[in-house]
Image (cartoon, rainbow, N blue to C red):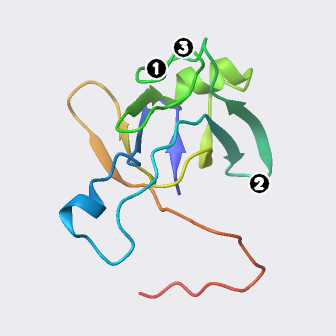
Amino acid sequence: MPYATSESGYDTGIAVANTTMDPGGAMGFGPFGGATQQTGTMTFYFYAQAGGVIASYTTSGSSPGDGLNSAGALPPGGTYSVLLSQLLKAAGGPSSFNGYVFIITQFTNGHGQYFITDFSGGFTAGAQLLVVSGPRYSVPEELVH
């Protein structure tokens, strides 16, 4: 998530879907069939705009938000929705945050969206989460504009 905030009356809503209930094989999507159903937790890393990780949080049975099972894992076909401020509180992090969030799921085929809002009906903006799969190597990435 390239930008998240919980400052100046704004908060960030986060939704992560576990799409391993994918019907791919039955629907004829591609030569590899559908996904293997998996249930797993998620770890959120909060990086402040000034640099450096300020907190991390792994979901558990007492996690805030909606959609997790009693063990704090997201089942196949489920969606976890939570506010950034709720996650920061659960992580023991600061209530005021500006930066980015990296989410690691313990299941494949995780997808999501985030929304920044002031909850007054005056402002809401959002985008899809970037999905990074497989091992990450130290190869420079080029931003295409």
Mark whose residue sits in front, 3 or 1: 3
- The amino acid at mark 1 is Gly
Horizontal side of 36 relative to 25 (left or right) equals right
Quarter of the image with the C terminus in it: bottom left
Q: Which residue is denoted by mark 3 in the rendering?
A: 70
Q: CA distance from mark 3 to mark 2?
A: 34 Å
Q: Residue at x 45, y 45 (%)?
A: 37
**As drawn, is 45 to the left or to the right of 107?**
right
How crowded pointer 1 is (Cα within 10 Å; few <14, some 14-19, many 20+) is rated as some
Q: Position of residue 86 (x, y in %)?
A: 54, 21
Element type where label 2 sits in the image: loop
Q: Amino acid at mark 3?
A: Ser
Quadrant in the picture for residue 77: top left
In this rendering, the label closer to the viewer, 3 or 2: 3
Distance from Cα at disc 1 to Cα at disc 2:
27 Å
Residue nearest the viewer, comparing 20 with 15 = 20
Q: Please report the residue visible at 40 percent of the width from the left and 29 percent of the height from the top.
A: 81
Q: Which residue is mark 1?
A: 65
Q: Earlier in the sequence, mark 3 or mark 2?
A: 2
Q: Quadrant of residue 129?
A: bottom left
Is 77 displayed left or right of 42 in the figure? left
**Residue under numbered circle 2:** 51
Which of the two discs, 1 and 2, labels the residue nearer the N terminus? 2
Figure check: 75 above or below 114: above
| Residue 95 visible in this rendered orientation of the protein | no
Query: Disc 3 versus disc 1: distance between alpha carbons?
Result: 12 Å
Picture coordinates of residue 90 (x, y %)? 66, 18
Residue at x 80% of width, y 51% of height? 52
Q: Is residue 135 left or right of residue 18?
A: right
Amino acid at pointer 2: Gly
The residue closer to the viewer here, 61 or 15, is 61
